[in-house]
Image (cartoon, rainbow, N blue to C red):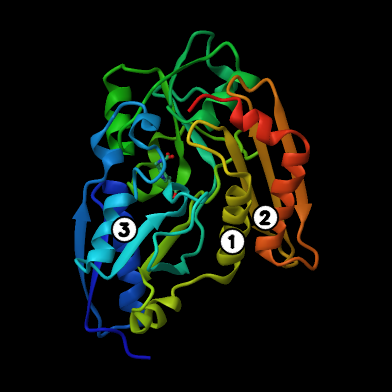
Amino acid sequence: MSAPELIRIVSRDSPMALAQVERVRAELAALHPGARTEVVPVKTTGDKWLGDLSQVEGKGAFTKEVDAALLSGEADLAVHCVKDVPADRPLPAGTVFAAFLERDDVRDALVHPDGLTLDGLPAGTRVGTSSVRRVAQLAATHPHLRCVPFRGNANRRLAKLAAGEADALLLAVSGLERIGRPDVISEVLSPETMMPPIGAGILALQCRKDDTALIDAVSGLGHPRTHQEATAERMFLHVLQGHCNSPIAGYARVDRSGELSLRACVFTSDGKTRLNAHEWAGRLDPATLGTSVAVALLRQGAREIIDGIAH
Ligand SMILES: NCc1[nH]cc(CCC(=O)O)c1CC(=O)O
């Protein structure tokens, strides 16, 4: 299969996003040694606005400008963290996911300058995170800690931590690995302690729908197990129709025997109510599994919880 001669890759311009692009370029170079790539970095609304994301049309704040560059033809291939791509609505018309790369670590990490663990943090410790998912889970399990709003890309958050704006941080392990800072991790939190978000650790390659040559060329970078997991997780979120202030967590996993399962939770903002569901796919395809888990949570009252949270 021959690849287009020049592939222009658009992405956010944060250090994490640019590291992600470098992974894509390396995998592309291995698969298509003849293809040249060029990077088109863009700043997104989510990078520029450091206040509350719900005030800037939260969802899509990290993807809108990237999608626009793809659709206008300024670039040919977009690299997204699946976690940042809204799942309640379809992808922008005229675009498709051409591949999901092999998934990285799905877990969150605690970053504490003195290496304390989550259970070792003293009462009143200020934990920097603006994630409603992390806030709700911490409120439930560690009510003596205090979450303080913390935005900005991962490097900036580490700088703000060093400047004393918080005592500890919660960040994705995969993100810290991508920016070359796994050294700051004081504890990796199990998914039971801190249920990850939909799409955690997965990079998606997005193309224009009519660019079949490029779609064919990059589809070889796709990872089948990750594809199943991403499909189940995104369908789950699509059926649930959450909003940017609704704490929702969950992850699908293909185990060693090849069986796909999806576990997921919906929380109230204070973490006091937590709905749980966990199902195995059996003979269901991944998307139907996602639907089934969402329906299981809706039967338990997820709609009322989600709609009861201001947004
Ligand atoms: N919201 C920003 C964001 N989007 C994706 C990741 C982590 C990497 C990934 O899951 O692909 C992060 C940083 C974080 O939450 O710590």
Mark 3 residue element:
helix
Quarter of the rendered image showing ligand 1? top left
Q: Residue at x 63, y 40 (%)?
A: 191
Whether residue 271 is visible, yes or no, is yes
Asked if disc 1 is less than 8 Å from ligand 1, the answer is no
The vertical placement of 236 against 71, above or below, is: above
Asked if disc 3 is less than 8 Å from ligand 1, the answer is no
Q: Residue at x 56, y 63 (%)?
A: 226
Which residue is tagged 2? 290
Which residue is tagged 3? 67
Q: How many marks?
A: 3
Q: Residue at x 48, y 28 (%)?
A: 311
Asked if the residue under mark 2 is in contact with the one under mark 3, i.e. CB atoms within 8 Å, the reply is: no
Q: Position of residue 245 (x, y in %)?
A: 50, 31
Residue 231's disc is 1
Q: Left or right: 163 with respect to 215?
A: left
Q: Position of residue 231 (x, y in %)?
A: 59, 61
Q: CA distance from mark 3 to mark 1?
A: 20 Å
Q: Nearer the viewer, residue 156 or 188?
A: 156
The vertical placement of 30 against 223, above or below, is: below
Q: CA distance from mark 1 to mark 2?
A: 8 Å
Q: Residues within 10 Å of mark 2 (few under 14, many from 20)?
A: many
Asked if disc 2 is less than 8 Å from ligand 1, the answer is no
Q: CA distance from mark 3 to mark 2?
A: 25 Å
Tag 2: amino acid? Gly
Mark 1 residue element:
helix
Q: Position of residue 290 (x, y in %)?
A: 67, 55
Q: Residues within 10 Å of mark 1 (few under 14, many from 20)?
A: many
Q: Counting residues from the N terminus, which is met first, the one under dot 3 or under dot 2? A: 3
